Amino acid sequence: MMPALVTALLWFGAIGCGLMAGVYFTFSAFVMTALARLPPASGIAAMNAINADIVRSLFLPLFFGTTLAAAALAALGVLQWGEPGAAAMAAGGAIYVLGMFVVTVARNVPLNNALAATDPASAAAAEPWATYVRDWTWWNHLRTVASTAACGLFVAGLIGFRISRGL
């Protein structure tokens, strides 16, 4: 049972991290650049709409499910230390939880909350919008890299784990 569970977690973790990396990459590569070119009131309104909709979409179960899988894989990697694939599992889980989940909770969400409190019609909205775009995008780059690295590490962990068991 344990090899099947670890294999399932690695598959889910790799696919989940890959999907999350794609979402974050999209924002880093062109969504934020496009929003930044809009007038501040339009950019703020668009980003606030995205932030409102994302928590009511399939993004949230994937976000939390992948985080739980990554945390479990980090723990399993530590518990199985020295086994093929264990270091990759532990590293992938730690990188994902710290570089994606913690960054999201500690940086991106507070920035989103501050943006939601900004009056887009205010003449003073341009400065907080420019700061938001700069800071949010920087932290999002980190989430993109962490999610991508974790995806690769989970694939490496899957290969090592499966080969070591002759699967």
Image (cartoon, rainbow, N blue to C red):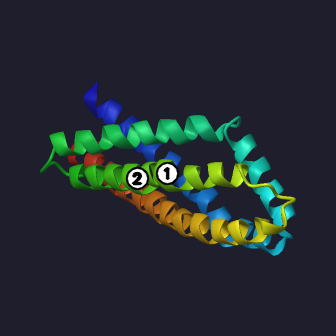
The answer to whether any part of residue 154 appears in the image is no
Can you tell which mark lies on residue 99?
none
User: Which residue occupies the foreground of this view, 167 or 94?
Assistant: 94
Q: Position of residue 126 (x, y in %)?
A: 77, 70
Residue 38, quarter of the rendered image: bottom right
According to the picture, the residue beneath numbered tag 1 turns out to be: 17
* Quarter of the picture holding the C terminus: top left
| Vertical comparison of 64 with 111: above or below | above
Foreground mark, 2 or 1? 2
Q: Is the N terminus in the top left, top right, bottom left or bottom right quadrant?
A: top left
Nearest to the observer: residue 118 or residue 44: 118
The location of residue 133, given as percent across then percent down, is: 66, 68
- Secondary element type, mark 2: helix
Could you tell me residue 148's position as x and y percent?
47, 61
Inspect the image, locate mark 2, and give the three-letter code of the amino acid beneath it: Tyr
* Residue at image location 75% in from the left, 41% down from the top: 53
Spatial CA span between label 2 and label 1? 8 Å
State the residue lying farthest toward the top. Answer: 1
Q: Residue at x 69, y 43 (%)?
A: 54
State the mark number for residue 96: 2
How busy is the neighbourhood of tag 1: few (under 14 within 10 Å), some, or many (20 plus)?
A: many
**Residue 114: horizontal and vertical position, in percent?**
64, 53
Is residue 113 found left or right of 75 in the rendered image? right
Q: Quadrant of residue 41?
A: bottom right
